Amino acid sequence: MAARLVIAITSQDIGARITTRRRVPEGFRDAVGILVSWESGVLTVRKKDGTLVEIPEETLVAARVVPAAPPRPGRM
């Protein structure tokens, strides 16, 4: 069974945690984080380490909203 790639996010999801898959020259690259903006065809995602990833909309092959990351053991 082949995987189904769907883009299931919109600009209304700004502030939500998302996962994305995009085309790059080497193949594909994934990014998980908070969607902080979607302007002029470019999505900006803040990863958990604080880095910002800019993703041109035309390179997206899959994206969706995901639940908050579960707490890590010993981090209360």
Image (cartoon, grey):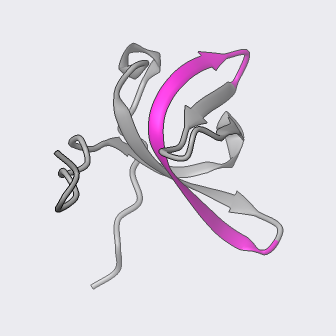
Quarter of the N terminus within the rendering: bottom left
Is residue 29 inside the magenta stretch? yes
Question: For the point 76% across and 62% down, which residue is it?
Answer: 24
* Observer-nearest of 55 and 8: 55
Is residue 6 inside the magenta stretch? no
Q: Is residue 29 above or below residue 52?
A: below
Question: For the point 23% across and 41% down, which residue is it?
Answer: 68
Residue 18 position, x and y percent, is 39, 40
Q: Is residue 6 left or right of residue 42?
A: left
Quarter of the C terminus within the rendering: top left
Q: Is residue 34 above or below residue 74?
A: above
Residue 30 position, x and y percent, is 55, 60
Q: Give the residues drawn in magenta, as a range.
A: 26-41
Q: Is residue 40 above or below residue 73?
A: above
Q: Is residue 76 left or right of residue 26?
A: left
Q: What is the total number of numbered labels drawn onto the structure image?
A: 0
Question: For the point 69% across and 40% down, which residue is it?
Answer: 58
Residue 56 position, x and y percent, is 72, 37
Residue 40 position, x and y percent, is 73, 15
Q: Picture quarter containing residue 67?
A: top left
Q: Picture quarter containing residue 25?
A: bottom right
Task: In the displayed orientation, state which residue is furthest to the right.
Answer: 25
Principal secondary structure, stretch drawn in magenta: strand
* Observer-nearest of 5 and 70: 70
* Observer-nearest of 8 and 65: 65
Q: Picture quarter containing residue 5?
A: bottom left
